[in-house]
Image: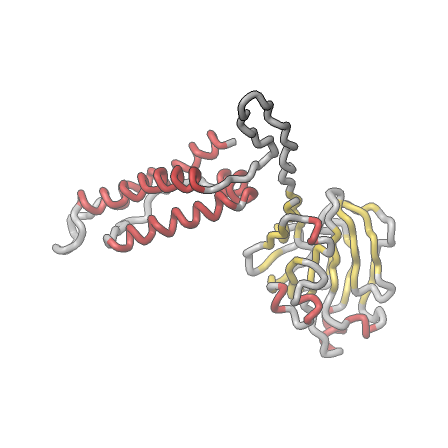
């Protein structure tokens, strides 16, 4: 994976390296941020300037040649480009040094090998657990709200599990992944499901909406139903919730978060149905 990711990164397409290697492993992603911060400080200190919006990666080098119309006192052609080339070299050197000084986890499992001491054979080491991830799509359309900003301490504190919330723009809720329905509240305001990869998802529409006793809610599934990603689970009436002066912000929680290494959330401000929302890392 690293060879094609490296080649594409040279020309400015870094997504294969980020989402295929560094972000799932986390440690290399942090190292990349540190590396980039040092390069940015170096370029800023020498006032390195890009004079045009050009290509990315190596194709960005021509953008740092100083045009003839730049007034006297600015970086010269040679200096400006050389600073940028030095920053490129720094990325390789710093990446190598940080890799040597930092313990890097296995991405897809593999044993650590202990050296043989004397005549004693090295003891076999169990393979590290393979890092698995599952993508959870958005079950609703709306603005994304961080979990800590949800107006309910039980959700905001993370006591129910890690996740995110949506301020819905309409009243449709669909399955965020394929799996089995494990919970349908009689009032219809919340539905739980277990995905095929074991994530237990709770979709809770609004805050304190249990007090509506089912008014404005209509469910389409029952406990035990097998559902496909995108299948409609329930509908609700936004106006009914707002008329009752209840918040419509709806948390989407991984209730068994403790069984995962981490739960990552989208950085987008708004999502549509089916957009990326969460990633569980096991």
In the rendered view, does 220 fall on the left or right side of 5?
Answer: right
- Can residue 131 be seen from the camera position used here? yes
Q: In the rendered image, which quarter is residue 151 located in?
A: bottom right
Point 62% across, 28% down: residue:
123
The foreground one among 156 and 274 is 156
In the rendered view, does 117 fall on the left or right side of 263?
Answer: left
Point 73% across, 49% down: residue:
199
- Can residue 229 be seen from the camera position used here? no
Place of residue 42 in the rendered image (x, y in percent of width and height, measured from the top left): 29, 51
Is the C terminus in the top left, top right, bottom left or bottom right quadrant? Answer: top right
In the rendered view, does 59 fall on the left or right side of 153?
Answer: left
Place of residue 12 in the rendered image (x, y in percent of width and height, measured from the top left): 40, 40
Place of residue 280 in the rendered image (x, y in percent of width and height, measured from the top left): 65, 48
Point 61% across, 34% down: residue:
109
Point 64% across, 28% down: residue:
124
The foreground one among 90 and 191 is 90
Place of residue 78 in the rendered image (x, y in percent of width and height, measured from the top left): 18, 43
The foreground one among 17 and 107 is 107
In the image, residue 49 above or below residue 210: above
């Amino acid at each position: 994976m690293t060879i094609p990711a490296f080649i594409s990164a040279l020309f400015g397409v870094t997504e294969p390296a980020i989402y295929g290697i560094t972000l799932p492993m986390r440690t290399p992603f942090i190292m990349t941020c540190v590396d980039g911060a040092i390069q940015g400080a170096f370029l800023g200190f020498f006032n390195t300037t890009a004079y045009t919006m050009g290509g990315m990666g190596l194709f960005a080098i021509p953008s740092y040649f100083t045009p003839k119309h730049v007034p006297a006192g600015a970086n010269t052609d040679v200096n400006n480009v050389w600073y940028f080339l030095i920053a490129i070299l720094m990325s390789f050197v710093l990446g190598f040094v940080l890799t040597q000084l930092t313990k890097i986890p296995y991405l897809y499992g593999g044993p650590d090998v202990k050296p043989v001491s004397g005549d004693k054979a090295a003891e076999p080491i169990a393979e590290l657990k393979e890092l698995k991830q599952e993508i959870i799509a958005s079950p609703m359309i709306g603005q994304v709200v961080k979990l800590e900003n949800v107006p309910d301490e039980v959700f905001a504190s993370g006591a129910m599990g890690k996740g995110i919330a949506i301020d819905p723009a309409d009243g449709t809720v669909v399955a965020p992944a394929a799996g089995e329905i494990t919970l349908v509240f009689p009032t219809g305001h919340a539905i739980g499901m277990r995905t095929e990869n074991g994530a237990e998802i709770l979709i809770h529409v609004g805050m304190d909406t249990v007090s509506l006793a089912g008014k404005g809610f209509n469910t389409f599934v029952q406990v035990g139903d097998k559902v496909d990603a995108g299948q409609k689970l329930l509908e609700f009436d936004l106006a009914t919730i707002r008329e009752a002066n209840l918040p419509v912000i709806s948390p989407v929680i991984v209730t068994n978060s403790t069984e995962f290494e981490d739960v990552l959330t989208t950085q987008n401000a708004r999502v549509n149905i089916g957009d990326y929302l969460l990633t569980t890392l096991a």
